[in-house]
Image (cartoon, coloured by chain):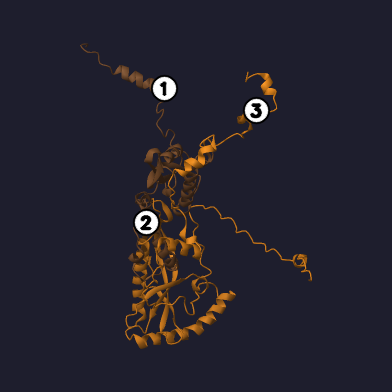
Chain colours: A brown, B orange
Amino acid sequence: MNRLMGRLFATRYQCNVQNNLHTSGKDFAWTKNTLPQSFLHCNKKIYPPQEIGEEPRPAFVCHQKTNIKYSHEKLWYIACFVRGLTVDEAIKQLSFVNKKGASFVKETILEAQDLAVKEHNVEFKSNLWIAESFSGKGMHIKGIRRHARGRLGEVRYQYSHYFVRLEEGKPPEDYFKRNPLNAQQQLDKWLDQMRKRKIINSF
Amino acid sequence: MANTVLTKLHPLWRPPQLICLPSRTTTTKHFDPKFRTHRAKKYQKIELPDMNEDENKFSEQKMRQKMKERGILPPRPWMERPFYIGATGGIFEPYVPPEGDGKASLVSTSRAKQTVQLLEKKSKSMLAIRKVKSFDEDFDTKEFCQQAQNIYIKAHESLVNGFRYQPGFWELAVSAPVPQRARQAVGPGTSHLIVITVRFHSRQQLAVYDRFGRLLHGSEILAKDVLEYVVFEKHLSNLYGAWRVHDKIIPDWAPPKDPSRLTRVKPDPEPVKVEEEVGEAQKDEQPAIADK
């Protein structure tokens, strides 16, 4: 209800906001925001200017989709699925995932990609990868279900949030650190360990 | 007995129902929907809010209906305080900088025209100065130029520090001894707004960074020659009126701007709407009402 009130004021307020000209107090239209804020604050962080010849700092953009009518636990699987992929690959993969949440994730990534190009000085929209992707718990509404012998069961109608951070550049080679060493490296490591052994009571 | 071939040949024998069913792709549904309605009845009906619907796109009727449902009164009328604007939107009689900053040859047609016009305007300019002196007796053109330069520097510094993401870098390396005053013009009627165009010739450095500290425009080590015609404005009849930077005149012969460092995708051109002609043929096709 608070939100609707806020929106109502916002509609009246819109003509002034567009012109950026208003002389009354800001608090007049204030309603408490219950949506997650801290993740989007990363978008406002300012980094110091870089020296000449320094490698350009990769741009990133944080984006979220709030109060999706979907369980955050189910959404988590899809969020994990796209981590460490390029944006194009993620979108291609998600369009074949036969789950309700996949469409929300895909939409959010596309929105974030658009934001990156329009507002965060990213030159090529395909030159992005998914650096962070996770789900959060949103509003939960409890309902009632009837059982036998006059008993009740609790039903939860769950809403969830989805958060994504896109970073400029190519994804790391081994995002999940599954196989950090190749065969030669493993052999070298083993040899090294063997040579470092200490034989007790020897010279 | 029940499984013999004879029973299967019987006309009443039906093939198993599984074959008749179309293949299912969704796996979340119960294979037998018989008790679906019964199970649904066990749940208490709740109206779940759609949190992502856009209230701005509601029609007036729907908004009214929603507010009635929730018992909300329409919002109070928005109370804005009045405010005063002491500046004009445009420039009166904008100064036209002579071609090539007055150094182009007199033979060129536009330059010759401009010299003639300049003589006409000079007399007007003198009148304007007299007007300023009638309000401000201490007005001195040389002093004003120094004052204008200070305003110009302050304006640039605050502009650079107030960039949206990253404070930029701006420095006035060398300024011409005193910026030359180019022209005055007085606003029409009794408004007593005066506009003075000042020519600034200076060397400046500018570097603009984005949020990540990457260089977007300019350079911190290279200085550039800048020639600008800056318009200052003052409301004379206002006792507390102050000189303000009002506008900048960019002449036609000015060199083109540096291109942006980033490439962008060119947006698709908007599709041209083809209006469908409502031909007379359509009108004729309407069946005539039969006489009774």
The structure residue drawn at horizontal position 50% and vertical position 83%, both measured from the top left corner, is B119
Tags 1 and 2 touching, CB below 8 Å: no
The structure residue drawn at horizontal position 47% and vertical position 63%, both measured from the top left corner, is B65
**What kind of residue is marked 1?**
Gln
Q: Nearer the viewer, mark 3 or mark 2?
A: 3
Of all chains, the one bearing label 1 is A
Q: Secondary structure at mark 2?
A: loop
Q: CA distance from mark 1 to mark 2?
A: 47 Å
**What kind of residue is marked 2?**
Gln
Q: Secondary structure at mark 3?
A: loop
Residue hosting label 3: B15
Q: In this view of the protein, can residue A55 be seen by the observer?
A: no
Q: Nearer the viewer, residue A39 or B174?
A: A39
The C terminus of chain B lies in which quarter of the figure? bottom right
Q: Nearer the viewer, residue B14 or B239?
A: B14
Extreme residue toward the left, this view: A201
Q: Nearer the viewer, residue B220 or B163?
A: B163
Q: Give x and y (percent) for residue A70.
A: 44, 44
The answer to which image quadrant residue A4 occupies is bottom left
Precedes in sequence: disc 3 or disc 2: 3
Tags 3 and 1 touching, CB below 8 Å: no
Say if B99 sits above or below A119 in the image: below
The answer to which image quadrant residue A191 occupies is top left
Q: Secondary structure at mark 1?
A: helix
**What kind of residue is marked 3?**
Pro
Say if B12 sits above or below B211 in the image: above
Q: Is residue B221 left or right of residue A100?
A: left
The mark found on residue A184 in the picture is: 1
Task: Report how many numbered discs are placed on residues in the image.
Answer: 3
Q: Give x and y (percent) for residue A188.
A: 37, 21
Residue hosting label 2: B166
Q: Residues within 10 Å of mark 1 (few under 14, many from 20)?
A: few
